[in-house]
Image (cartoon, helix red, strand yellow):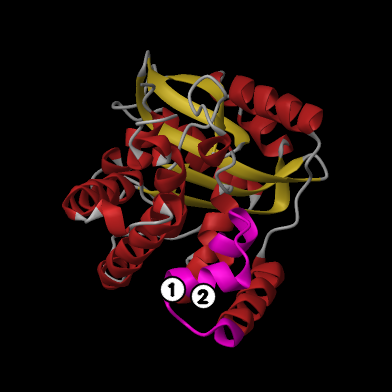
Amino acid sequence: MPGSDPYLEHRRLLFATAYQLLGSVADAEDVLQDAWLAWNAADRAEVRRPRAYLVRMVTNLSLNRLTCARATRETYVGPWLPEPLLTSPDVAEGSEVADTVSTALMVVLESLSPVERAVFLLRESFGYSHAEIAGILERPEPAIRQIAHRAREHVQARRPRFDSDRAQRELVTARFIAACSGGDLNAVMELLAPEVTAWSDGGGKVTAARRPLHGPDHVGRWMLGVLAKPQVRGAVLRPAVINGELGVLVGFGEVPVGALTFDLVEGRIWNLRLQVNPDKLGGLRRP
C-alpha cells in the first residue's frame, strides 16, 4: 500500500521470526519494540529493501537476546518449555503466525546453537535461500550451507514422529478433555501410550513437577492431581489450536491458567507438555 510503514506492513512476519527464534511471546514483543525504535532512528532513504532490512534487524536482535536467555535457562526451576501461542484462524490472522512451528519442534530447537536455530528457521520455516540467510547473518554462503545441513540432520534425528490425522487428533482431544474433566483415571490412562512422558513448566511461580514423569499411571494421576489443586479446581478445559496443532486450553472464562500440547502416535498420547507458568501465558489471551 503506497505510503504505508514497512514495519507495520511486515509486523506479523517479524513477530513470527522473533517468536520462533526465542520461544517466548514476551521476549518477541520486546525485540519488536527494540526494532521499532531502531527502525524509526534509521535513515530510511538508504534502505532499498525494507522487508529484508527489518528481518535482518529482528533476527540479530533475537540472536543477541537468545544468547543471554540460554544462561538464564540453565538456572530455571524445573523443565523449561516454550511459551504457547494461540494460532486459531480467528486469532492468528496471517499465515506467518498461523504457521508457527509446533511446541514439539520448538523443544527440539532448544538443543541447537543460536546460529543453527536461526539458519534452520529462516531456511525451513520461512523459505529463505542460503544466499539470503548469508546476507541476514553476515556470514559466507558456504558456511551457511554447512550450518543448515548440520541443523537439519540434528532436528530430523530428534524430531518426534507422530500422527497427523486431524480427525483422530480431534477425537483423542475430546476424549482426553472428557476424562480429565470427569476425574476418570482409567479413561485418562487408556489414552496414554505405555511410553508416555509428561513435562510441566511452572517456572517456580506455581507448583509443577520438577522432573519428567513416565508411564500412564504416574502421568494420569499427576494430571488429575493438577486439575484438583485449589487454584485450578473449576477451570474449564477446551480444545484450542496452539502452535499450529490442536491442544487443550485450561482457563476460567477468557483467563488462561494453562496449556496442554501433546504428540499423538497410533491414537495414543506420547509426549505431554503442560505450561502453567503465569509469566508464559500471554500468548493464550485473545486480542
Verify whether residue 153 appears in magenta: no
- Where is mark 1, residue-wise? 137
- Type of secondary structure dominating the magenta stretch: helix
Q: Position of residue 68 (x, y in %)?
A: 26, 70
Q: Quadrant of the N terminus?
A: top left
- The answer to whether residue 129 is magenta is yes
Give the residue displayed 66% in from the left and 28% down from the top.
173
Query: The residue under label 1 is which amino acid type?
Result: Leu
Report if the CB atoms under discs 1 and 2 are less than 8 Å apart: yes
Q: Is residue 273 left or right of residue 262?
A: left
Q: Could you say whether the residue bearing mark 2 is in a helix, strand or loop?
A: helix
Image mark for residue 134: 2
- Crowding at dot 2, Cα within 10 Å, few <14 / some 14-19 / many 20+, comes out as some
When the figure is inspected, residue 279 is found, relative to residue 115, above or below; the finding is above
- Mark pair 1, 2: CA separation: 5 Å
Q: Does 3 sit left or right of 1 as displayed?
A: left
Q: Against 170, is 61 above or below?
A: below
Find the magenta span and give its range.
Answer: 121-143
